[in-house]
Amino acid sequence: MSMVILRRALERRRLSTGHRRERGAVMIEFLLAVPIVILFLFAVIEFSLFWRNSLTVSTASQLGARAAANAGPYRLADHNALSSTLAALDELPEDASVERIVVFKPIDNNGTMDPECASGTSKAGVCNVYTGALLGNPTPADFTTAADPSTQTTCELGSPDEAWCPGSRSNDFDAGFDQVGVYVVIRHRFVTGLVFPNREQVIRDETVMQLEPEVNQ
């Protein structure tokens, strides 16, 4: 009888030890998996924010190009394009910064932008590059001193849109229709440095449209 009791006690002890070992193994596996799960969640969040900002930049370039195309040779065409673009970029979080906006004339029928314009240099007859204070809250006074910009076809010396003056753009059936593009560059800042060691990433997008035909009154 005593031998039976002893065997049962040893069996219970063996089973108890086995359960403790299993619980210990599960705990170790859990502790090993937690960092991987956390890293995966951070990656999902980071990619989601990056993708959202990419869509915002794409929308901003489209709205800017549409505003420039609708304005045609109007003196404040670039002001309208900048205002529309920046209004859309207001959706960006505070840690994302607008680096530059370029209003450009494509160098071919495929909508290609001149490399100098893409790198941030205004070029005569080709593009206007906007940086700094003009990316805040541009006003008509930043572009022209004319009392009635609708009657002005030239750009003052030193105006931000002097390089490719809107008044030189063609939108009539006799001279043909120019194309206008808006190129947007922002710096996206990642929330953490866990997924991407480089905390910043540049997001670029551009849209090219044909100027709308002039409507004769």
Image: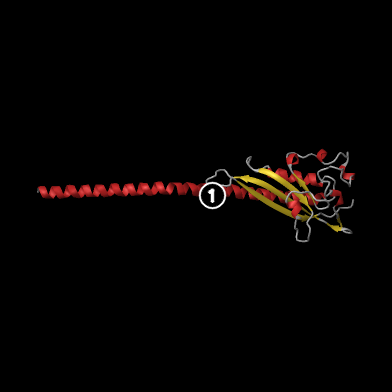
**Point 48% across, 46% down: residue:** 38
**In screen coordinates, is 44 left or right of 113?**
left
**Point 81% across, 39% down: residue:** 142
Q: Which amino acid is tagged 1?
A: Val
Res 186 seen here: yes
Per the image, label 1 sits on a secondary structure element best described as helix
The chosen color scheme is: secondary structure
Which residue is label 1 attached to? Answer: 44
When asked about the image quadrant of residue 143, the answer is top right
When asked about the image quadrant of residue 148, the answer is top right
**Point 65% across, 46% down: residue:** 187
In the rendered image, residue 183, in percent from the top left (x then y), is placed at: 73, 51
Res 91 seen here: no
In the rendered image, residue 110, in percent from the top left (x then y), is placed at: 75, 61
**In screen coordinates, is 116 left or right of 26?**
right
**In screen coordinates, is 201 left or right of 2?**
right
For the image shown, how many numbered marks are present on the structure? 1
In the rendered image, residue 100, in percent from the top left (x then y), is placed at: 72, 46
In the rendered image, residue 92, in percent from the top left (x then y), is placed at: 65, 43
Q: Residue furthest bottom?
A: 109
Front residue of 101/19: it is 101
Residue count near mark 1 (Cα–Cα under 10 Å), binned few <14, some 14–19, many ≥20: few
